């Protein structure tokens, strides 16, 4: 019998050995390996001691003895590619688990039974999102939309696809998508996706476009200049960042982090108070992902309007001033309205709408959020920066604007396609138009839009896919 790594370490370090001698191994069949990436060294050390004190064996190195690999906040794709490079004898025998398995096991004081929810797996729709993104970087819009649509369909299913037969009869799954699903079912991974994830250009474009104010065009330009990292961009004198990109880099750590529901709620209170201080009867709605009930988002979106048409003019600039006075405005880009009712209906649905709006970065303080802010480890600041969008449609455009800004992008895209193809109707954030009757249809509420389209009302929380 070979000595296990645990004993080997104990022998190698007498100081630790004395501490560990008291730790009796209770679960011989389990050998845990904690992935340091994302977890960090100190937390890993802490969790290692904790587990050993409870009689678990924890290996410091990833050897063939390891039975349970535990990772925290790791992307499935990246984790699996890393694991495969470690040269283990039989990777299929290893359980690759989320930290939740570890936490539960510590609580129970024994290794809890592994359930499927503990597994870190490549999810088919994540793979499709990578393919969509890569198609977008390659300016293949058709393919990009096809992958996004397929990903949406899979996301909307009540459970993961377990066999290829389960995809029978599902709409919007083309042959590329079917091939991806088949591969993931067979190998737990998709080679094409892994190839993309390792591609230098994809990595650079993904990194660059994660900066607020940097789109695929700018990212491509930087890539072509040979730039690969933020450091290289910021050190390149020939590159002139615009105001938005400067803010994007300045607050990158905060705004690349997700916004929680509690943080969105706190912002809602701030915006509401500010808007109502200026105009008590103004109408404010939280839109975007949070209106759809999502737990996390990348920003917080609001619609603001007034009960009477025309009174919204000038309101947004007041709101901006007021936020400025409160000292919480970190960045603001205001866009005046370019709305022109005589230019409707528009056929260019994917374009930005014409309403007055502003893109903000707002400072949110710890004590304003129920349960506190989400923090980066080691961060002692009492605030974080959050992206906020405020959009001001005139009240007679409120319903279409609300539907558009509530999203999801895919839901609204498909609703528009349905309207056009099945009903000969055009709609965007500004209006709903009936091509057969050659007239605009009046909409005061979202329900009106669904009625005109001859559809059952779809609640915001059902519009996620
Ligand atoms: P977001 O990009 O904020 O997405 O746009 P989201 O659904 O809230 O998701 P996260 O959580 O922030 O990432 C919100 C909605 O606003 C629409 C988009 O199509 C999306 O459905 N939108 C965005 C417009 O209608 N017009 C625009 O100019 C921009
Ligand atoms: Mn949003």
Image (tube, rainbow, N blue to C red):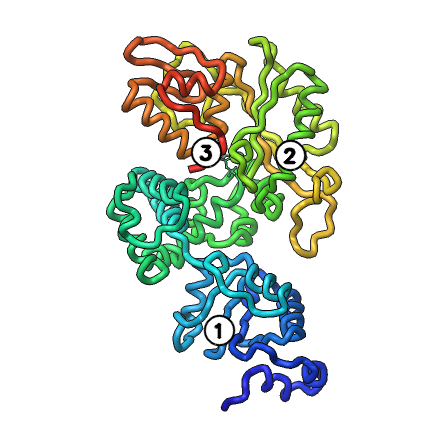
Q: Which residue is mark 2?
A: 265
According to the image, label 1 marks what residue?
67
Q: Nearer the viewer, residue 142 or 18?
A: 18
Q: Give the mark nearest the N terminus, 2 or 1.
A: 1
Q: Residue at x 70, y 44 (%)?
A: 371
Residue 259 shows in this picture: yes
Q: How many discs appear? A: 3
Tag 2 secondary structure:
helix
Does label 1 or label 3 sit earlier along the sequence? 1
Q: Mark 3 and mark 2: span between their CA atoms? A: 20 Å
Of 281 and 353, the residue lying toward us: 281
Instruction: Characterize the local packing of mark 2: few (<14), some (14-19) or many (20 or more) Cα atoms within 10 angstroms.
Output: some
State the residue in front, 372 or 249: 372
Q: Residue at x 39, y 43 (%)?
A: 157
Q: Secondary structure at mark 3?
A: helix
Image coords of residue 421 (percent x, y): 28, 24
Percent of width and height locating residue 22: 70, 82
Classify residue 260 by image quadrant. Answer: top right
Determine whether the beta carbon of the residue marked 2 sits less than 8 angstroms from the nearest atom of ligand 2.
no
Please say if the residues under marks 1 and 3 sit with CB atoms less than 8 Å apart. Answer: no
């Amino acid at each position: 019998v070979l000595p296990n790594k645990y004993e080997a370490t104990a022998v190698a370090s007498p100081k630790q050995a004395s501490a560990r001698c008291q730790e009796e191994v209770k679960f011989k069949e389990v050998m845990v390996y904690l992935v340091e990436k994302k977890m960090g060294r100190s937390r890993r050390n802490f969790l290692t001691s904790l587990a050993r004190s409870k009689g678990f064996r924890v290996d410091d190195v990833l050897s063939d003895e390891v039975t349970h690999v535990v990772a925290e906040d790791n992307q499935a794709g990246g984790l699996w590619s890393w694991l495969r490079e470690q040269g283990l004898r039989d990777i299929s025998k290893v359980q690759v688990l989320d930290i939740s398995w570890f936490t539960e096991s510590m609580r129970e004081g024994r290794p809890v039974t592994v359930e499927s929810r503990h597994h870190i797996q490549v999810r088919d729709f994540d793979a499709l999102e990578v393919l969509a993104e890569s198609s977008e970087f390659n300016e293949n819009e058709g393919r990009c939309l096809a992958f996004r649509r397929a990903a949406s369909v899979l996301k909307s299913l009540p459970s993961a696809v377990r066999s290829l037969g389960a995809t029978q009869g599902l709409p919007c799954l083309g042959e590329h998508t079917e091939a991806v699903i088949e591969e993931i079912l067979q190998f737990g991974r998709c080679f094409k996706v892994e190839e993309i994830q390792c591609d230098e250009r994809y990595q650079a474009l993904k990194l660059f476009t994660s900066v607020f104010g940097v789109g695929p065009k700018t990212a491509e330009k930087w890539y072509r200049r040979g730039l690969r990292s933020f450091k290289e961009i910021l050190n390149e004198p020939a590159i002139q960042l615009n105001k938005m990109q400067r803010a994007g880099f300045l607050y990158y750590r905060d705004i690349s982090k997700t916004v929680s529901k509690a943080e969105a709620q706190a912002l809602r209170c701030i915006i509401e108070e500010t808007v109502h201080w200026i105009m008590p009867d103004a109408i404010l709605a939280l839109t975007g992902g949070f209106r759809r009930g999502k737990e996390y988002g990348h920003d917080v979106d609001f619609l603001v309007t007034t009960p009477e048409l025309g009174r919204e003019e000038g309101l947004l600039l007041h709101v901006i001033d007021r936020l400025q006075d409160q000292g919480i405005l970190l960045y603001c880009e205001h866009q005046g309205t370019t709305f022109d009712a005589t230019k409707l209906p528009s056929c260019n649905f994917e374009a930005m709408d014409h309403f007055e709006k502003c893109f903000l970065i707002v400072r949110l303080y710890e004590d304003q959020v129920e349960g506190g802010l989400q923090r980066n480890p080691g961060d002692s600041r009492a605030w974080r920066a959050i992206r906020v969008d405020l959009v001001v449609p005139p009240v007679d455009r409120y319903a279409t604007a609300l539907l558009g800004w509530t999203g999801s992008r895919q839901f609204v895209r498909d609703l528009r396609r349905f309207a056009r193809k099945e009903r000969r109707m055009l709609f965007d954030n500004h209006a709903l138009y009936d091509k057969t009757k050659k007239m605009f249809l009046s909409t005061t509420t979202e329900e009106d839009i669904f009625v005109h389209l001859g559809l059952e009302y779809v609640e915001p929380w059902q519009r996620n896919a």
